Image: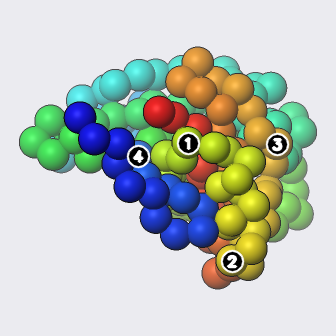
Amino acid sequence: MPTPAEHGTAHAWSWHHAGLVVDDLDRATQFYREALGFEIEFLVRDMDDQFQRTVGVPGVVCDLAQLIAPSSATRVELIEVRGVPEGLDPRLPVHVGVGHGAYQVRDLEASIAGLVASGGAQLGEIVQFAEGRAVYCWSAAGTVVELEEAE
């Protein structure tokens, strides 16, 4: 199988998922499953250190579910966040309704540099997950982009 081409200054080779902060993960997951036919790909409860470092907000904890549509392999990530301090930037991906787009890249540092060169900025730390390293960034438009290192 040929290696997918990289695109843009961030060298993204694949869109992976859309993420959305929700007020109740169980209710949101049930809705996506019943109303839209999604299936749970994985579920994590009480993620603290990794999430805090990724979003750059100490003290927050999240429950996270990644769901997949069997008809198209479209993924949606639903995140319920607890312990959000008052007065944070409302664009941060800890507030209900805030979303992000996640893109797969091969060289995370080079992709961050390319995103920054296009007017973006790194939001949190690069964090190691079971699936690989990831980082949240600001786009030049003030939206959140997640870069995931994957082969």
Nearer to us of marks 4 and 2 is 2
- Label placed on residue 118: 2
Q: Earlier in the sequence, mark 3 or mark 1?
A: 1
In percent of width and height, residue 45 lies at: 58, 20
Residue 19, image x, y percentages: 48, 50
- Which residue is identified by label 4? 16
Measure how far apart labels 3 and 1 are at the Cα level: 17 Å
Q: Earlier in the sequence, mark 4 or mark 3?
A: 4
Q: Is residue 128 above or below residue 69?
A: above
Badge 3 marks a residue whose secondary structure is loop
Residue 18 seen in the current view? no
Task: Tell me, yes or no, whether the two marked residues, 3 and 2, touch with CB atoms within 8 Å.
Answer: no
Foreground residue among 18 and 59: 18
The residue positioned 28% from the left and 41% from the top of the image is: 2
Q: Which mark is residue 106?
A: 1
The Cα–Cα distance between marks 1 and 2, rounded to whole angstroms, is 18 Å
Residue of label 3: 125
Residue 150, visible in the rendered structure: yes
Q: Secondary structure at mark 1?
A: loop
The amino acid type of the residue labelled 3 equals Glu
Who's the residue at 47% across and 33% down the image? 151
- Residue 89 in percent (x, y) is at 81, 67
Residue 147, position in %: x, y? 60, 49
Query: Given the image, on which type of amino acid does mark 4 rest?
Result: His
Three-letter code, disc 2? Ser
Of label 4 and label 1, which has the lower sequence position?
Answer: 4
